[in-house]
Amino acid sequence: MAHPQNLDFAHSQLRRQSMNAPARMKFGVFMAPFHRVGENPTLALERDLELLQWLDHLGYDEAWIGEHHSAGWETIASPEVFMATAAERTRNLRLGTGVISLPYHHPYMVANRMVLLDHLTRGRVMLGVGPGALASDAYMFGINPARQREMMDESLGAIKRLMDSDEPYTYKSDWFELNDAHLQLRPYQQPFPLVVASVQSPAGVTTAGKHGAGVISLSVPRDMVRSTSLKDQWAIAEETAAEHGQTVKREEWRLSVGVHLADSKKQAQEDIREGSARVVTEYFGNTLGHEVPDVPRDQIVDFMTDNKQWIVGTPDDCIQRINELQEMSGGFGGMLVRAEDWAPRDKLHRSYELLARYVMPQFQGSLSGIKTSQQWASDLKDTLQVNRRAGLERASQAYEESRQRS
């Protein structure tokens, strides 16, 4: 069993504090989901729900559910409906839309559905938004791709206004209209948690800063129009927030990354060698037209691991990479495993269990007392052994004395 025995816990805690990392990091999944074309879609959705139940059992904090309408692989059309089902099968796992594509919807309907879910779950839901990731979705709906990000910003402003105030709200846009609009059911959570996805442009962090929302970023930004590091992304969010009288919090900044863990790095890579190649070549390459690694198919997992776009290895490897990401970013508050269907169920569930058992405690402060107590007992072991033997000898002596008296 590979687990973090050599990590200097106290040193890592101090280093994270110096990087503005939270004392307790949130862990969860970003579930698009990705299911290979040709599989039974009903069973695939059931596996997604089963995974969320497993995460709830393991103590993960949250799960973010995507919205997609085309291209065959990402098959949840309504994250709200999926989240309502998942809420009935879990107890503590918080559920977020990851994300609702705002240009596809009237903002009032987005706000109303989320507030209803907020009450039904007693405050276990979060609203994550984006402009829409699939060009094929926007094409079907007749949405101009060049306008999607400004539409997202405009819609989020309306949603936030509806949730924050019960005063009637009138607003006229070229694509939606509100006349004395108000939500008759007010949010259960105050304030309602809002998060913006940041994937391919600075628009996500700019919108988050403008509205004081959280951020979900890819750990390695994809096809950025301009080169933007993680630190640059957060700087943009902070600068924009200051310009609009808002604040953004690093503890509400989450990074999403592909992760698969096993007892050895070799085993982890073999677990997903074929499945990960399918996702990269068949979906991102052949279906969406994204650039894929220029390596043989059976070496894709090695390339992605070596270039640190995925975390594939042992719990120790995962801990090391999270610390690297904390340094690269200056500190973030949550790590989301990009939920993949790239290995058999038992290996996938084992990976999440390894992360929960050996990685999460290193970033959530739950080991500090354990380690202190163990060291304290170890330092006193010689004295304690003397005391233990003295106690045993006294008990034996008392027993002999009682026998003699009888």
Image (cartoon, rainbow, N blue to C red):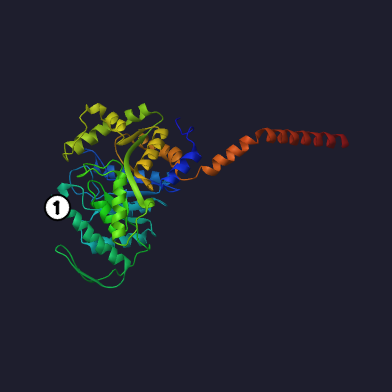
Instruction: Tally the marks.
Output: 1
Q: Is residue 119 above or below residue 274?
A: below
Q: Is residue 286 above or below residue 134?
A: above
Task: Report x, y in % for residue 306.
Answer: 31, 30
Query: Considering the numbered disc 1 on the image, is that residue within a helix, a strand or a loop?
Result: helix
Task: Report x, y in % for residue 331.
Answer: 38, 46
Which quadrant of the figure contains the N terminus?
top left
The residue positioned 41% from the left and 45% from the top of the image is 19
Task: Report x, y in % for residue 319.
Answer: 41, 37
The answer to whether 151 appears left or right of 351 in the picture is: left
Res. 125 image quadrant: bottom left
Residue marked by disc 1: 146
Outermost residue to the right: 405
The answer to whether 148 appears left or right of 377 in the picture is: left
In depth, the one of 364 and 22 nearer the eye is 22
Q: Is residue 166 above or below residue 279?
A: below
In depth, the one of 2 and 20 nearer the eye is 20
The residue positioned 58% from the left and 38% from the top of the image is 374
Circle 1 crowding by C-alpha within 10 Å: few under 14, some 14–19, many from 20 = few
Res. 41 image quadrant: top left
Which quadrant of the figure contains the C terminus?
top right
Decide if residue 62 is in sight here: yes
The residue positioned 77% from the left and 33% from the top of the image is 393
Decide if residue 80 is in sight here: no
Task: Report x, y in % for residue 386.
Answer: 72, 33
Disc 1 residue type (three-letter): Ala
